[in-house]
Image (tube, rainbow, N blue to C red):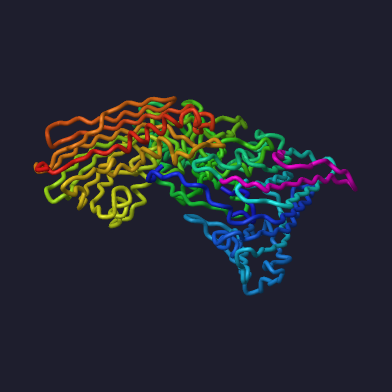
Amino acid sequence: MRMAVSMLGAILSAAAVYAEPAMPPYEVVRDHVAVEVAADGSYVETRDVAYRVLDRAGLKLLQERRLSYTQGFETIEIADAYTLKADGRRIDVPPGNIVSGYGQALPGGFSDNQTISLIFPDLAVGDRTVLRLRHKLLVPWFPGQFAIGFPFSRTVPSHNRMYSVTVPEGMALKIDAVGLTGGEAVHEGGTVRRVWRFADDAPEPLENDAVSEADFAPHLSLTTFADYGEVAKAYRIRARYKTRITPEIAALAERLTRKAADKREEARLIYEWVASHITYVAIELGSNGFTPHTARNVLANRLGDCKDHAALLEALLAVKKIKSTAALIRIGDSAYTLPSAASPHAFDHVITYLPAFDLFVDSSSELAPFGTLPYADAGKPVILIADGQEMRTPVPTSAQSQVKAESTVEISADGSATGHTELTASGAVGLQIRRMVQSIDVGRENGFLRKAMGLDVEGTIARGKPASLRDPYAMSFDYRMPGALVLPEGALSPSWSPLPVSLAELVAGQLPPSRGSDYVCPSLTVEDAVKLVIPGAVRFSTIPEGKVLEADGIRLAVDYRRMDPHTLLKTTALRIDHPSATCSPSYYAGMRGRLVEMTELLSRQVRYRSASE
């Protein structure tokens, strides 16, 4: 799905340790933008921008600049581009350093975006890149409508930023300006001009796990859409007739559902077919970035993007008299609010809503079982295309999103360990694990195991059926680790199995001293049971006490049970239930002390020593 991006802008992991945020890599010295809008919604945007490189990371970011536009709809003209050295010397970008690209391909898809790449010569820390350009939107993405947005990151210093927008007199403009000054209307010569200014000399690093800056940072959005109902109507007009039922579609729907017991099962069977038989391919060709292909073409070609998936799914469901509607959503970042100025550019994805079951589904999320949304879709605002209604997708609960692992680890007299883990997973976290398993190349299993358990681990993965679309998903690991136990004494790692989620990360993230922004906090259940068997010449010298810790929305239970002198069963059960997909800084402040206790509980070690000691 096509989305507007700035031309010049650029759960499954090991537990991380909090580190002080890095300094900003560059600063915005100047950014002057002037937009002149025509009555039909087309516009001309001129831009004069200068960045200063502050460190080597900034040098890497600013050395090459890539601009993109859609042929036939937009043009970009470079007026001036040069490196301004710290000593005042100007070095122009030579023609050979400006490269145009054609027919650029998206990962896993197609796009007619054209690119212009500029490489700034002799750029060093302390220098500036200067770029002046003219960008024209020749054909409005939606006839008669105008929408544009300018985000302002709080993570880099900004100086002398000025944005002017001129529209015809009488053009109804909705404006969402946060953190900027100015904006007063100046009427002159049949036009209305507004100018905003922004500066930020005290940048703030983006916190780990924080929601997108789009939810809280300064921004300027302008649109002629009256509200999101009008945005939905514009999409509805484009999608008109795309979901028509053809004889082929009708026959397929009847064949798929002939053994279904009820309407919900009919919907599930149709969804599963679309999810598993229509290959997801991102397609951004002209206005098709906003418009689906016909359901007939999607079925014939067996491929399509998110809009195409929704169109075919709607047509197939309609055969069985099951109502559905496409729904606009943003999944590309952790944004959980919509701009007050309604814009189609606030969205980058399309899913489907089935009102009879009050259920959202995403058939373009290839491995998602019926009714399971990825965490990236959860708790997000959506706009129903059928009627413009604003809703919010549900947040998975601990009962719906679960991982359960049972392991046996046996340590031999030579100190090596062999282990076997049986794992089941369901819901959103199950989808994450399905994707993880599918992403592991055959023959590269050791890489995953070593990342999870240590550098010397070797083993195999029985992948099960990640594409089955039925929960629970089941898989297993077999592994061998040399040097797991070193005599005459030592401590065993707190993690004894290749559990593909980090309990400490789920509990507390990186455990920063404080938070200033809302952050993403998923809900789920993780249960891990490990039976550890040590050789006869070794005994357990210290076994931590089991403990249960509870706090607002989180319950952690860790228990150790000695089954015989050489066998220990460790069970860990983590249940997290948050009412929304995000948590607030005040919640974190009140919980941090308890989260520290939980991470300490998870880090406790079992100690051992030689029986002769």
Residue 244 image point, x, y percent: 54, 40
- Tell me the quarter of the image containing the C terminus: top left
Which stretch did the figure color magenta? Answer: 176-205
* Residue drawn at point x = 69 percent, y = 42 percent: 221
* Residue drawn at point x = 23 percent, y = 52 percent: 459
* Residue drawn at point x = 30 percent, y = 42 percent: 499
Q: Can residue 438 be seen in the rendering of this structure?
A: yes
Residue 199 image point, x, y percent: 71, 47
Is 272 inside the magenta-drawn segment?
A: no
Q: Is residue 399 left or right of residue 186?
A: left
Is 181 inside the magenta-drawn segment?
A: yes
Q: Can residue 314 be seen in the rendering of this structure?
A: no
The quadrant in which residue 571 appears is top left
Residue 43, compared with residue 407, is above or below; it is below
The quadrant in which residue 477 appears is top left
Q: Is residue 210 left or right of residue 421?
A: right
Query: Which residue is situated farthest in the front direction here?
Result: 613
